[in-house]
Image (cartoon, helix red, strand yellow):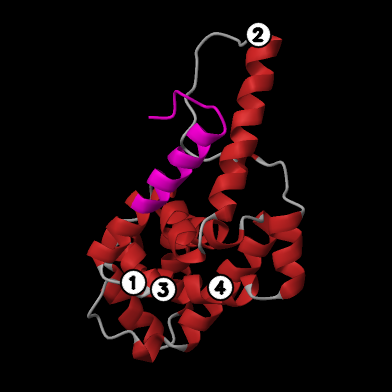
Amino acid sequence: MSIDRVTDAELVERARHGDAAAFGELVDRHRHAVYRAALAALRSPPDAEDAAQDGFVTAYRRLSSCRGEASFRTWLLSITWNQAINHRRSATRWWRVFVQPSAGKEDAPAFEEHSSADPSPEQALAGSRMRSDIVREIRALPAKLRDALLLAQAGEYRYEEIGAMLNAPVGTIKWRVSEARRLVRQRLRARGYSDVG
């Protein structure tokens, strides 16, 4: 039987018994989701890579505590989120990520619309200002709202997974995402953007 047809639960069991290839397959299966969760928390690709790596190392060390009450992915994402939050608490990282933001594509949230036509210079400038204002308003949200919104906007996680990462019930996560979107839209309208929904 090919290893790619084996369930996560079977791979976890093999990894507990010393099968390094089984854990390697788990890493390969969940690498992207783990990195995106760390990136949502840290907004810095290098820091996200570090937190993702820490998440995998911690998960490997704690395999015996993976009981199967949640999926392996959810368990792993919770560990990674906690590692990312630990990274984020560092004053140096906080300063670099939130006071001197990178201009990478990851900063552009999913609120923006894409046009098939090339924008005029004026439209490009207006779009750039709006993206900058959106990022500013998202960063100004309380951490609980911001974290829930960034994870939901990533589009890769079910609300149950976000709830596990943030240690909150699904209903609370849905409210936080909705409230974060409402606040960002309200603040953008106050800045003069009339087409933000």
| Tag 4: amino acid | Ile
Q: Which residue is mark 1?
A: 164
* Front-lying residue, 153 or 47: 153
Position in image of residue 80 (x %, y %): 49, 72
x 54%, y 8%: residue: 117
* Front-lying residue, 171 or 140: 140
Nearest to viewer (mark 4 / mark 3): 4
Position in image of residue 72 (x %, y %): 33, 72
Q: Can you tell which mark lies on residue 85?
A: 4
Q: Can you tell which mark lies on residue 78?
A: 3
Q: Quadrant of the N terminus?
A: bottom left
Q: CA distance from mark 4 to mark 2?
A: 40 Å
Does residue 10 belong to the magenta stretch?
no
Q: Callout 1: 10 Å neighbours few (<14), some, many (20+)?
A: many
The answer to whether 109 is drawn above or below residue 39 in the figure is above
Image quadrant where residue 22 sits: bottom left
Nearest to viewer (mark 2 / mark 1): 2
The secondary structure making up most of the magenta span is: helix
Q: CA distance from mark 1 to mark 4?
A: 14 Å
Cβ atoms under marks 3 and 1 closer than 8 Å: yes
Q: Which residues are magenta?
A: 179-197
Q: Element at badge 1?
A: helix
Q: Can you tell which mark lies on residue 120?
A: 2
Q: Callout 3: 10 Å neighbours few (<14), some, many (20+)?
A: many
> Does 79 sit left or right of 74 as displayed?
right
Residue 5 visible in image: no
